[in-house]
Amino acid sequence: MSFEIVRKIIPFSQKGYCCSQILFLLALESKGDANPDLIRSMAGLCNGIGYSGEICGVLTGAACLIAFFAGKGSDEEQENDRFNLMVSNLVEWFQESIGGKYNGIKCEEILGEDGIEKPDLKICANIIAKTYSMVTKILEENGYKI
């Protein structure tokens, strides 16, 4: 995990962005791009899908990030043949790496019941950084560059 990534995550968090939004902010920033509508839409995945404590927003946001690059985006485009495999590899890695450490992949399992409303930045920043690195690796292995 890169300390550089964590250094970028903290200011985004301090500005009020959640985990799923931060993943896209990192990717867009690396491309020298911005997309407020996309960032706003990622808020629906915050803190386990709308603050419900369900599946971690880092995982769902990371799946969306893979789709951003490899999914179908217009009538003329085709989804990458390996798209489902890329997402499957991400989920498997997340279940083993994060789920194994925190006994689950739900926000509530990772942060505890009280952590949903006010996530622990140390825990979340590390999960975001590790997952962003994994998504970058998966995409690069399939011909995409963030």
Image (spheres, helix red, strand yellow):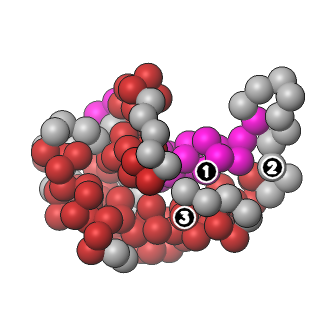
Can residue 40 be found in the magenta stretch? no
Marks 1/2: CA–CA distance: 10 Å
Specify which label sits upstream in the sequence, 1 or 3: 1
The amino acid type found where label 2 is placed reads Asn
Which residue is under mark 3? 136
Query: Which structural element holds mark 1?
Result: helix
The amino acid type found where label 3 is placed reads Thr
Residue at (83% x, 34% y) in the render: 77
Can residue 71 be found in the magenta stretch? yes
Marks 1/3: CA–CA distance: 9 Å
Which residue is under mark 1? 66
| Label 1 close to label 3 by CB (< 8 Å) | no
Marks 3/2: CA–CA distance: 16 Å
Quarter holding the N terminus?
bottom left
Residue at (55% x, 57% y) in the render: 146
Specify which label sits upstream in the sequence, 1 or 2: 1
Which residue is under mark 2? 80
The image quarter containing residue 49 is top left
Task: Name the residue at the front extreme.
Answer: 32
Left or right: where does residue 121 sit relative to residue 133? left
Q: Nearer the viewer, residue 126 or 99?
A: 126
Position of 64 relative to 125 (above/below): above
* Residue span colored magenta: 50-72
Position of 16 relative to 85 (above/below): above
Query: Which structural element holds mark 2?
Result: loop
Marks counted in the figure total 3
For the stretch drawn in magenta, the main secondary structure is helix
Query: Which structural element holds mark 3?
Result: helix
The amino acid type found where label 1 is placed reads Ile
Q: Position of residue 82 (x, y in %)?
A: 80, 57
